[in-house]
């Protein structure tokens, strides 16, 4: 028997901080993507009761505001070297595994692609 009591902690979504505004459907979605393939993403913040408390856009934010917040979060993520990171567009909701595309134009809207974490 383990001699220590393990305390369970619950974490509120309001206490979490994020480095991107989109996610993919499953962990590991990047593993079967080729360099030219793109996958759909979805907005994290749409499922939150108060996304602004976690540094995410509001549900009624304009595309400009969403991109502004996503860009700020991406610049934070860029300070961390994670070899498996890729790129995404928070407006078109697409992601790619090729980090060398960072800051290049989105193939759909032309905005600069931002850094995306797969896990």
Image (spheres, rainbow, N blue to C red):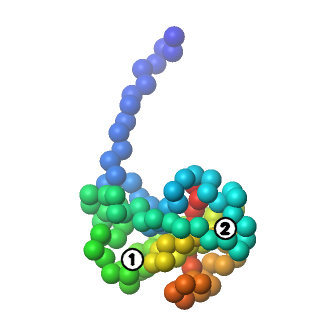
| Position of residue 82 measured from the top left corner of the image (x, y, whole percent) | 65, 61
Q: Residues within 10 Å of mark 1 (few under 14, many from 20)?
A: some
58 sits to left or right of 79? left
| Position of residue 60 measured from the top left corner of the image (x, y, whole percent) | 28, 74
Q: Residue at x 26, y 57 (%)?
A: 49
Marks 2 and 1, Cα distance to the nearest angstrom?
22 Å
Question: Which residue is farthest right?
Answer: 34
Depicted 74 relative to depicted 51: above or below = below
Residue linked to disc 2: 97
Residue 91 seen in the current view: yes
Q: Residue at x 60, y 64 (%)?
A: 80
Q: Residues within 10 Å of mark 2 (few under 14, many from 20)?
A: many
101 sits to left or right of 62? right
Q: Residue at x 66, y 67 (%)?
A: 97
Residue 81 seen in the current view: no
Question: Which residue is farthest bottom?
Answer: 110
What SS does tag 2 mark?
loop
| Position of residue 18 measured from the top left corner of the image (x, y, whole percent) | 44, 61
What SS does tag 1 mark?
helix
Query: Which mark is on residue 66?
Result: 1
């Amino acid at each position: 028997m383990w001699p220590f009591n393990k305390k369970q902690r619950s974490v509120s979504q309001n206490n979490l901080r994020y480095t991107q505004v989109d996610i993919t459907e499953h962990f590991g979605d990047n593993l079967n993507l080729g360099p030219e393939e793109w996958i759909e993403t979805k907005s994290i913040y749409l499922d939150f009761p108060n996304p602004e408390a976690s540094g995410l856009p509001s549900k009624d934010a304009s595309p400009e505001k969403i991109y502004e917040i996503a860009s700020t979060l991406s610049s934070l993520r860029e300070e961390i070297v994670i070899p498996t990171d890729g790129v995404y567009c928070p407006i078109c909701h697409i992601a790619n595994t090729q980090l060398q595309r960072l800051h290049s134009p989105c193939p759909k809207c032309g905005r600069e692609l931002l850094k995306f974490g797969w896990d």
